[in-house]
Image: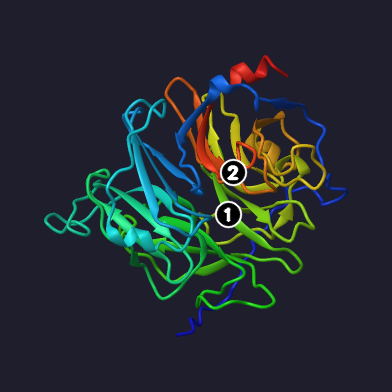
Amino acid sequence: MRCNFAVTLLFAATPFLPAQEKIPRGYTIPLIDLAEQKHRQIIVDREKGQYLGHPSTFLFEDGKTMLIVYPKGHGKGAIVMKRSTDAGLTWSERLPTPANWATSQETPTLYRTISPPSPPGRGVGGEGAGHNHLVIFSGIYPIRMAHSPDDGKSWSDLRAIGAFGGTVAMASVIRLKNGDYMALFHTGAYGLDGKKREPREYRVYKTLSKDGGLTWGKPSVIAEKPGAWLCEPGLVRSPDGKQIAVLLRESSRKLNSHVIFSDDEGETWTKPRELPGALTGDRHTARYTKDGRLFISFRDMALDSKTKGDWVAWVGTYDDIVKSREGQYRVRLMKNHKGYDCAYPPVEVLSDDTIVTTTYGHWTPDEMPYIVSVRLKLDELDRMK
């Protein structure tokens, strides 16, 4: 059945943004290369002859327990889950999962959600206000979700969240100031109805949950641009909490990555504009460190870069993004040995400011991709510039 969702874009005024002139396709900031620093690398999972890809992680509130999920295949494939009790230094064997997780059609993504306040005796979804949930999304058509009410000890099957599909669902999830959750995904080669599109229709969508992430509303468009293939939205909130930025992959490979902003909790958005080459890549994942800087991990797809196709990170400030500055420096985390097939990289920041970023890639020539974490601190990198 074809989904007939209205496409309505609302644009907010942003007088503070600079004019788009002479956007650099490369970068001039320093590049720190960690690719040969094996002591930073921890193999999460590796299986001879088996493609392991596209991980998503969650760091529990205790600061030590982590979960990771990833597919046995390029996006599509059975979802694998592992647990760490030492913040990613070691990992369990593969954990039991529901049988229908083997039917996953797209990159799985893992998030924490929390039930909102509810009247006494009427907890949302059978759980009271403030109850912690874990959810896993799997996209294409329809977008499906699995739920755990007990921090991953038990899980539901993957179940449809609505009569709509999408790619890399959900690329980002954020809790809004009113307690709702906003999740972002995109369409491109496939539409909301799950049917192939020719020409492709790249649009970035949001969907809202008002019950702690257990159910989700109809999607609406937040970004599209003629001539650009915008996708894989990576959310980051400003340090003062007043603004949300979304970094966007540009998949036609003709333009740099883009960014949009919202000053009203996602109700309206600025028009997409290009980012500098230093931030051009795929599947941006951003986290703050204690000093207020951003560490953003992604696949390098800058049009002019000697590390193109590798797993990289960018270090800078939120204000650098707003003002279209290049940032402080770039980091090559690992070298990818086959094309551009790597780096959908979750990022966790531990209590001591150690960054644990994890992804898949062709880390050994002529072998299938496998899952690796890299551990670092920004003060270490600062001394290496």
Q: Is residue 186 visible?
A: yes
Residue 37 lies, with reference to residue 221, above or below; the image says above
Q: Which mark is residue 233?
A: 1
In the shown orientation, is residue 134 left or right of residue 334?
left
Label 2 is placed on what type of residue?
A: Ala
Residue lying farthest bottom? 1
Residue 165 lies, with reference to residue 152, above or below; the image says below
Q: How is the image coloured?
A: rainbow
Label 1 is placed on what type of residue?
A: Pro
Residue 66 lies, with reference to residue 274, above or below; the image says above
- Between 84 and 180, the one lying in front of the other is 84
**What SS does tag 1 mark?**
strand
Q: Position of residue 74 (x, y in %)?
A: 53, 55
Q: Position of residue 288 (x, y in %)?
A: 54, 32
Q: Which residue is found at the position 49% from the left and 47% from the top?
A: 52
Q: Which mark is residue 343?
A: 2
In the shown orientation, is residue 258 left or right of residue 55?
right
